[in-house]
Amino acid sequence: MEWLRPNEIPQLLHAGIFRLKPGEPFEFELHLHDDFTELLFIRDGYGRFVIGGQEYQVGPRSMLVYNEGVWHEEHSNREQEFDAVYFAFRGVRIGDLPSNHVTGADETAVVQFHEEFYRVDEHLTRIIREFHSGEPESGSAANYALGSLLVDIVRIMRHSQSRPSLRNAPSTIAVVAKTYIQKHYGKELTLPELADAVYTSPYHLCRLFKKETGRTPIQYLIEYRMEVAKHLLVTTDETLEQIAERIGYASATHFQNLFRKVAGMPPGRFRRLHKGESD
């Protein structure tokens, strides 16, 4: 099976290098990219990264995958040097994955390379050189070089016996389910749908999710929706009806009842208190 579609060449949007000395932090708070994917290759240094709700402690010779639409945050160890290369791109289809995804929901977002990192690093150097050269056709050359890198990554991840994967790992089923909820909270979600997303049964999902988090998947969904609602109440002027619809509720009354139960007060009062308005 050909994982990469031969007629589709990725479009490289940004590329660069971070070379930071001790005391110079690599810090990016929680964010997502809604129309491209980013890869971060750590050549040297260490850090704490949260991708799709899962925390990773990452070191040299690692690749971090920030698929389109996935929340992530980045924190290097500021006591050490940090050397990394990043690429932002779109226009990629790999196998049956969604557009602009390099890994699936059942796979780890961090790939630890070994001896193959040296050949990966050759790709990185060539892509950076072409992208910033300013020579004729340098943009096309960088796009094709990126395509070559992705082919190599697919070889390593899809055809290596030791490739990292989250599929069927009980301790990570809750993480994958949480990630799915965080990405799809705005639509109607059912327990069977969540179970299908993590390749298990509703009963097994509930049991493992509660063991890992102390609450059921549906309880977590409600709590996450209320956190989003709190953010929207404070940072926007949207009506309660609009917020209810954005977080997956057709009924504003139902939303208000759930919010009161979770937050201990009605959403209108929460908005006034946090905007400094009189109650």
Image (spheres, rainbow, N blue to C red):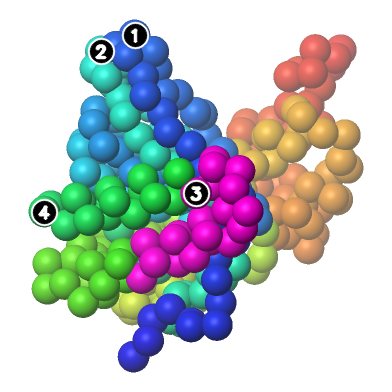
Q: Quadrant of the N terminus?
A: bottom left
Q: CA distance from mark 3 to mark 1?
A: 31 Å
Residue 241 location (% of width, % of height): 86, 50
Residues packed near mark 4 inside 10 Å, few (<14), some (14 to 19) or many (20 plus): few
Q: Amino acid at mark 3?
A: Glu
The numbered dot on residue 130 is 3
User: Which is nearer the eye, 234 or 226?
Assistant: 234
Residue 135 location (% of width, % of height): 59, 48
Q: Element type at marker 3?
A: helix
Q: Amino acid at mark 4?
A: Glu
If you read the primary sequence from the N terminus, does the residue marked by circle 3 or circle 4 appear first? Answer: 4
Residue position marked by numbered label 4 in the rendering: 115
Q: Is residue 181 above or below residue 82?
A: below
If you read the primary sequence from the N terminus, does the residue marked by circle 2 or circle 1 appear first? Answer: 1
Residue 160, by quadrant, is: bottom left
Q: Is residue 210 above or below residue 80?
A: below
Q: Element type at marker 4?
A: loop
Residue position marked by numbered label 2 in the rendering: 79
Residue that lies at the very extreme toward the top in this rendered image: 23
If you read the primary sequence from the N terminus, does the residue marked by circle 2 or circle 4 appear first? Answer: 2
Q: Amino acid at mark 1?
A: Gly
Give the residue displayed 31% in from the left and 29% down from the top.
83
